[in-house]
Image: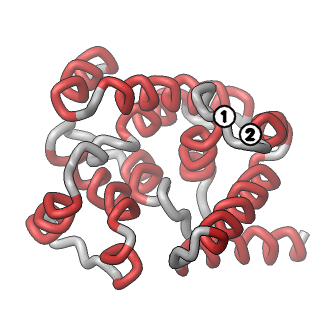
Amino acid sequence: MDERQIINKLTEMLEPKRLRHSIRVMECAKRLARLHNADEDKAAIAGLLHDCAKGFSGSELILRSKEYEIELDEISLCQRGLIHGPLGARVANDIFGIDDLDILSAIEYHTYGKRDMKLLEMIVYLADLIEPGRTFEGVDELRALALEDLQGALLKALDNTIKLVIARGGLIHPNTLEARNSIILNKKKL
């Protein structure tokens, strides 16, 4: 499927606001890919499809995860918003015919990250946070940092996410902690 076909299909699956967000993430991911010497086409597709499972209700997320044999951890079951990443990777493969493992992994881990994130995974994670429609405090600083230092921006984004989740009394997914710690450990090795 090309971009236009994907957008047409997403129109059937997502609310208009979510589709506009996905298009902005696609554009932001392409820009970051260009700046950081990543594959722009892969970044575009991953950015566009990152929320393809976001239109499912909480119970549908669970049901479809079972259908795709996705093992859900306790934290994802409590905070169902995390499920759309892993489920989205399966939906991107099954419904949109995406079989590129880099794209699927970027979609899968855009919600909570993982240890030793690859370039495309970092790009999609950050593009989701810094696309032009985002207005949270500190987003402009994060946008500027992402242009210069992708790992630094990712570390700051993870730190911000952890602080926000703690402030809200939520559960922190272990992958988020592993993503953060692996960046710090990798910087110490340099």
**Image location of residue 120, percent across then percent down:** 56, 46
- Circle 2 — which element? helix
Number of other residues with Cα within 10 Å of mark 1, as a class: few under 14, some 14 to 19, many 20 or more = few
Q: In this view, does 157 lie above or below 43?
A: below
Residue at the location (40% across, 43% down)? 50
Number of other residues with Cα within 10 Å of mark 2, as a class: few under 14, some 14 to 19, many 20 or more = some
Distance Cα–Cα, label 2 vs label 1: 6 Å
* In-image side of 48 versus 121 (left or right): left
Residue at the location (36% across, 43% down)? 51
- The residue singled out by tag 2 in the image is 139
**Image location of residue 32, percent across then percent down:** 67, 32
Q: Quadrant of residue 58?
A: bottom left
**Image location of residue 122, percent across then percent down:** 62, 51
Of 40 and 78, which appears nearest the observer? 78
- Circle 1 — which element? loop
The N terminus - image quarter:
top left
**Image location of residue 179, percent across then percent down:** 64, 70
